[in-house]
Image: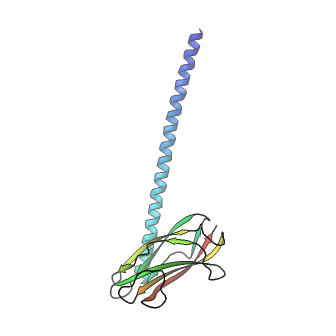
Amino acid sequence: MLKRGSLNLSINAIVVVVLAFVMLGLGLTLTRTVFKDIGSTSGSINEQIRQQILDDLRTGNKPLSFPQNKVTVEFGKERTIAFGVKNTGSSAAFYCIDILAREKNGDNDAGIEFYFDTDMQSLNAQNTVVIPATVDSRGASQGQGLYRGKIIVYETLGEGAECTGSYDGGDWKVHAQKSFFITIQ
């Protein structure tokens, strides 16, 4: 009799282990499906933003499109934004871009970093480009709070100019600019 009881216990243990593996497999499949759907949704949202920027540049004949007036970033984190530039002229032109962040109550550098393609952009007449940028809040000088941001697009006036980060006078003129707010939470 003791042997039969131990055999029942072994069969029950095997059934429990098999059921546990089946449940684990179902859970992993569900998790994978959910995260795949989130990734595709995020990609479609980014494509929607890109399309909104392009439509804004085409219909409004604006030289710069940045659809947000306020960007919210969690303190110590990064966030991706996008903006568009259009050559509204009648011939090809070269552009450099600068993005600045200042403290709310002054002209001091906010310590917020922007990462984007800093190479010179060449655009034929009436062409557009959408540029993604990452806002890095880890160096925010005052931590959480409100900051002022500005995107400035410079157009070169002469040949041989390079994107150096300093565009005062010389071979550069401001093509377009847009101010916005950055909230660090």
Indicate the quadrant containing the N terminus: top left, top right, bottom left or bottom right: top right
Q: Which of the 4 quarters of the picture holds residue 95?
A: bottom left
Residue 53 position, x and y percent, is 44, 74
- Residue pictured at 46% horizontal, 52% vertical: 36
Residue 30 position, x and y percent, is 49, 45
Q: In this view, does 27 lie to the left or right of 74?
A: left
How many numbered dots are placed on residues in this image?
Answer: 0
Residue 120 position, x and y percent, is 39, 78
Q: Which of the 4 quarters of the picture holds residue 63?
A: bottom left
Indicate the quadrant containing the C terminus: top left, top right, bottom left or bottom right: bottom right
170 or 181: which is nearer to us? 170
Residue 37 position, x and y percent, is 47, 54
- Residue pictured at 56% horizontal, 17% vertical: 8
Q: In this view, does 20 lie above or below 71?
A: above
Q: In this view, does 109 lie above or below 79?
A: below
Determine the residue located farthest toward the top in the rendered image: 1
65 or 156: which is nearer to us? 156
- Residue pictured at 62% horizontal, 80% vertical: 108
Give the colouring mode of the picture: rainbow
